[in-house]
Image (cartoon, grey):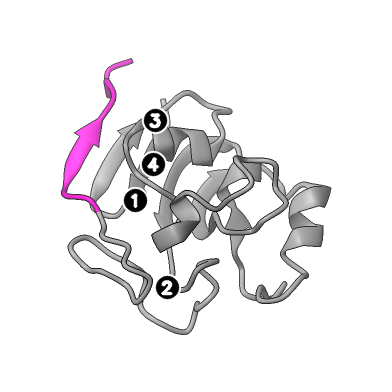
């Protein structure tokens, strides 16, 4: 079973689960500040769940590629929409500052930090049963 590492937490999930759902089910958010409430609920149209992902995930969907071409996103920033990304193996996820998480030139929003949008990261913890 894949492990998702995000903001000091490790979340165990099933292969093929959508990254956004994995994070939200674990009490973590792929959003910053008010984007927790002001988002498209996983339809791939708002872009507020953009994150950097390292590890085994699905290829970008057409919807995702189109949305990440629209400002404030930069298609060359290497971000993914967590709502359009399937977890295929172990991954590490980073969320950057800004309403859309678009400020990739800054430090990721991390463990006990708060970004300028008021987002506070979670504490270290493991979620799920690592033994399956």
Q: Callout 2: 10 Å neighbours few (<14), some, many (20+)? A: many
Residues under numbered marks 3 and 2 in contact, where contact means CB atoms less than 8 Å apart: no
Residue 2 or residue 62, whichever sits in front:
62
The magenta-colored residue range is: 122-132
Pointer 2 residue? 97
Q: Callout 3: 10 Å neighbours few (<14), some, many (20+)? A: few
- Mark 3: secondary structure: helix
Quadrant into which the C terminus falls: top left
Decide which of tag 3 and tag 2 comes sooner along the chain.
Answer: 3
Q: Residue furthest bottom?
A: 105
Give me the residue at 50% from left, 68% from top.
99
Give me the residue at 32% from left, 72% from top.
115
Locate residue 47, reporting x and y percent: 64, 59
Pointer 1 residue? 6
Please, what is the dominant secondary structure of the magenta stretch? loop
Pointer 4 residue? 4
Give me the residue at 66% from left, 43% from top.
84
- Between tags 1 and 2, which lies in front? 2
Decide which of tag 1 and tag 2 comes sooner along the chain.
Answer: 1
- Mark 4: secondary structure: strand
Q: Callout 1: 10 Å neighbours few (<14), some, many (20+)? A: many
- Can the viewer see residue 85 in this picture? no
Decide which of tag 4 and tag 3 comes sooner along the chain.
Answer: 4
Residue 18 or residue 117, whichever sits in front:
117
Compute the Cα span from label 4 to label 3. 12 Å
């Amino acid at each position: 079973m894949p492990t998702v590492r995000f903001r000091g937490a490790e979340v165990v999930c099933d292969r093929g689960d959508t990254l956004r759902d994995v994070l939200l089910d674990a009490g973590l958010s792929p959003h910053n500040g008010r984007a927790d409430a002001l988002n498209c609920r996983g339809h791939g149209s708002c872009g507020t769940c953009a994150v950097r992902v390292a590890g085994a995930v699905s290829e970008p969907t057409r919807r995702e590629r189109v949305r990440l071409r629209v400002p404030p996103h930069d298609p060359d920033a290497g971000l993914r929409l967590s709502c359009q990304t399937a977890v295929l193996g172990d991954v590490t996820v980073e969320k950057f500052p800004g309403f859309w998480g678009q400020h990739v030139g800054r430090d990721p929003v991390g463990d006990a930090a708060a970004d300028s949008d008021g987002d506070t990261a979670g504490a270290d913890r493991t979620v799920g049963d690592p033994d399956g």
